[in-house]
Image (spheres, rainbow, N blue to C red):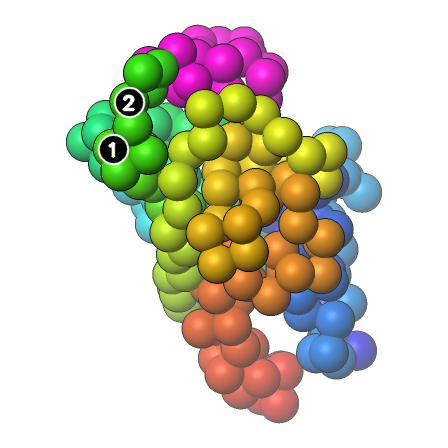
Amino acid sequence: MREFVLATGNKHKIEEIRAILKDLPIKIIPLSDFPEFPHTIEDGQTLEENAVKKAKEAAVFFKKWAIADDTGLEVEALNGAPGVYSARYAGEPCSYDDNNKKLLKELSGLPKEKRKACFRCVIAIASPDGKIYTAEGKIDGIINPSQSGANGFGYDPIFFVEEYNKSFAELSPSIKNQISHRARALQNMKEKLNQLINML
Ligand code: IMP
């Protein structure tokens, strides 16, 4: 079985990525198995820069192919913010709840048609000798005026998917993993992953 390091310690991302890639004959080794790995500083100006940096650093450190994800929530009324700064929107350090509350405050009073947003995810795959591949996935939604649902993580309780009439946090993990930004980015990467699996 081909091994890929998954360059994240976020247990929710690990679960989702494992579920989305479950049909591929690969073993995913998350960074949470390696506390000695030096944390990558996410100082890129774009999701792609951060995803590539995370994948590269893990690939070089472990001398293995590595996969990384960088995600941002882009809110139309905020000209695309928090975007690449989604993790630290409410300052540093901050919780998911701090971020959600700050965003709800920023948008308070705005009608539904002014609450459009999307999640954008960039997946990067890097080899120890410097090969890099990237793919992107996106899903549109609306920022609900309050939090609902207990599944998922991050901004899921306030991200409303019109097609399902539910927030991401109200959807079952299996539905989220079929339609999410992360699922779509990984889907767009599957052909390349299959090629690599056959080549390695
Ligand atoms: P990261 O920099 O890719 O780890 O993610 C930035 C922030 O976006 C995280 O702190 C989460 O709050 C949020 N985020 C990433 N992916 C998701 C998701 O699938 N649902 C909700 N929030 C997410």
Task: Please tell me which residue is depicted at 63% across the width and 30% down the height of the picture.
Answer: 148
Regarding residue 16, the answer to whether it shows in the image is yes
Residue furthest to the bottom in view is: 198
Residue situated in front as seen by the camera: 54 or 161: 161
Disc 1 marks which amino acid? Lys
Q: Is residue 91 left or right of residue 111?
A: right
For disc 1, the neighbor class at 10 Å (few under 14, some 14 to 19, many from 20) is some
For disc 2, the neighbor class at 10 Å (few under 14, some 14 to 19, many from 20) is few
Dominant secondary structure (helix, strand or loop) of the stretch shown in magenta: helix
Residue 197: percent from left, percent from top: 63, 82
SS class, disc 2:
loop
Disc 2 marks which amino acid? Leu
Pointer 1 and pointer 2: residues touching (CB < 8 Å)?
yes
Task: Please tell me which residue is depicted at 77% across the width and 67% down the height of the picture.
Answer: 27
Task: Please tell me which residue is depicted at 26% across the width and 38% down the height of the picture.
Answer: 113
Q: Quadrant of the C terminus?
A: bottom right
Q: Exactly how many numbered labels are in the figure?
A: 2
For label 2, the residue is 110
Residue 175: percent from left, percent from top: 65, 61
Label number found at residue 114: 1
Residue 94: say if magenta.
yes
Q: Is residue 62 above or below residue 28?
A: above
Residue furthest to the left in view is: 79
Is ligand 1 less than 8 Å from the beta carbon at label 1? no
Q: Is residue 45 above or below residue 90?
A: below
Range shown magenta = 90-106
Task: Please tell me which residue is depicted at 62% across the width and 89% down the height of the picture.
Answer: 198
Residue situated in front as seen by the camera: 75 or 194: 75
- Give residue 169's quadrant in the image: top right
Q: Is residue 82 left or right of residue 162?
A: left
